[in-house]
Amino acid sequence: MTLVVHDFSGHPFQAELSRRLASLGHDVEHLSSAEYVSGKGHLDLQPGDPTTLQFATVALSAPFQKYAPLARLRWEASYGRAWIKKLRDQRPDAVIACNLPLVSMYRFARYAKRSGLPYVMWHQDIYSSGINDELRRRLPGPLARLGARVFVHMEAYCARNASHVVAIGDAFKEVYPSWKVAPENVSVIPNWAPLDKVFPVDRANPRSATLFDDDETLRLVYAGTIGRKHNPRLLVELLRSAREMGVAAAMVVVSEGESADELAEIAQHEPGLHLTVLPFQPAAELPNVLGSADALVALLEPDATRFSIPSKVLSYMAAGRPIIGLMPHDNPAAADIAVTGGLVVDPDSNGVAEAAKWVETLAGDPDRVR
């Protein structure tokens, strides 16, 4: 069978699925976006990969403008057209679609229905929910509600016409009845971390000295996208609070985009904060980057908790480091953090204060983290 696995973001565990499918004898092309900036997986052939696997990108001549609504919608429509053109040439037997922007996904779903192309919608987020939050921030009430109905209709169409929907959490199933998605066409499969690509390493490793100046510093790392679902100021508050308590703490944030730029500006104007912001690192460096930390930090805002499960927590767990989750307690990722001995606190000032005290206990117990 000829399969296309299209993970727009280019994340690690989706590439692992493609490798597994190819090892089972399928001809697999793994696609991702050339323009989308994020932490990437191993998106090239590795030693031992099946000969039936290939990696490629869908590339446009314009950058992905994440926070410019009209330009973004035009870009998503163009991306959908470019991918459909590629599919017409390839004629695969089936497609697995993951993390695609909603307009791109909708264009693809309409094409798939017309052409009889089976596809699995690997549902990582209720995308219309996040878009609707953005509409409410930017538009008057009536216009926001009208736009919300349009985007919900688009996402429902994509799910309803899929041969199967794979959701990453049980909460997703709450919306499917109103979308007229047949229950027998839905499976819940939680995300995972690729354990052969992310694994525990020594705190002193080839990257630790380039990330942190002082071996005695209590090291905090945040690695991953910072979007509307995250409050980057909480990272600053956490580091500042820990240092005010007398903890010799430093933090490295590995990310890109508007929020990362905001953090970099804070770091520049407050050098005593010991905050460093770096761009996304090569996939091969991820174990050493995460392993350099004494604790890893995850973020999630309350209004995103029902339909967003931060997969970075799974990579953190694979790295074997303590985790601080500034997120609602009812999120499935929060349960993972708690069961592995980490700390989950509300994503607000009270939670930051509690997390800073926990960082203080880590600093006083170096055998726990080193």
Image: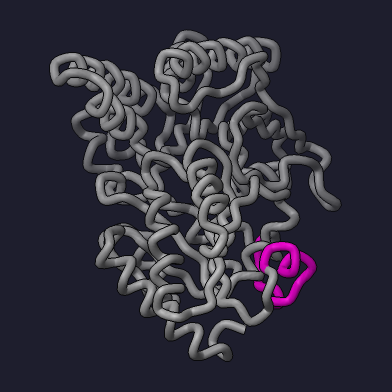
Give the x, y percent position of residue 200: 66, 72
Examine the structure image and report whether residue 76 is included in the region drawn in magenta.
no
Residue farthest left in this picture: 142
Q: Is residue 118 left or right of residue 23?
A: left
Looking at the image, what colour scheme do you see?
Answer: one colour
Residue 244 appears in which quarter of the rendering?
A: bottom left
Q: Position of residue 191 (x, y in %)?
A: 48, 53
In this picture, residue 268 sits left or right of residue 107? right
**Relative side of 163 to 277, left or right:** left
Q: Is residue 180 visible?
A: no
Residue 193 image point, x, y percent = 57, 58
In the displayed structure, would residue 328 be above or below residue 58? below
Q: Residue at x 32, y 28 (%)?
A: 131
Viewer-proximal residue, 175 or 242? Answer: 242
In the image as oriented, which residue stretches furthest toward the right?
A: 47
User: Residue 173, percent across and down?
Assistant: 27, 43
Residue 49, placed above or below residue 335:
above
Q: Quadrant of residue 214?
A: bottom right
Q: Nearer the viewer, residue 194 or 317?
A: 317
The image quadrant where one finds the C terminus is bottom right
Quadrant where the N terminus sits is top right
Q: In the visual, does 271 lie left or right of 58? A: left
Q: Residue at x 46, y 22 (%)?
A: 105
For the point 33% across and 59% down, the residue is: 327
Of 80 and 20, nearer the camera is: 80
In the image, residue 303 sits, relative to residue 342, either above or below, namely above
Q: Is residue 347 among the parts visible in the rendering?
A: yes
Magenta region's main secondary structure? loop
Q: Which residues are magenta?
A: 198-212
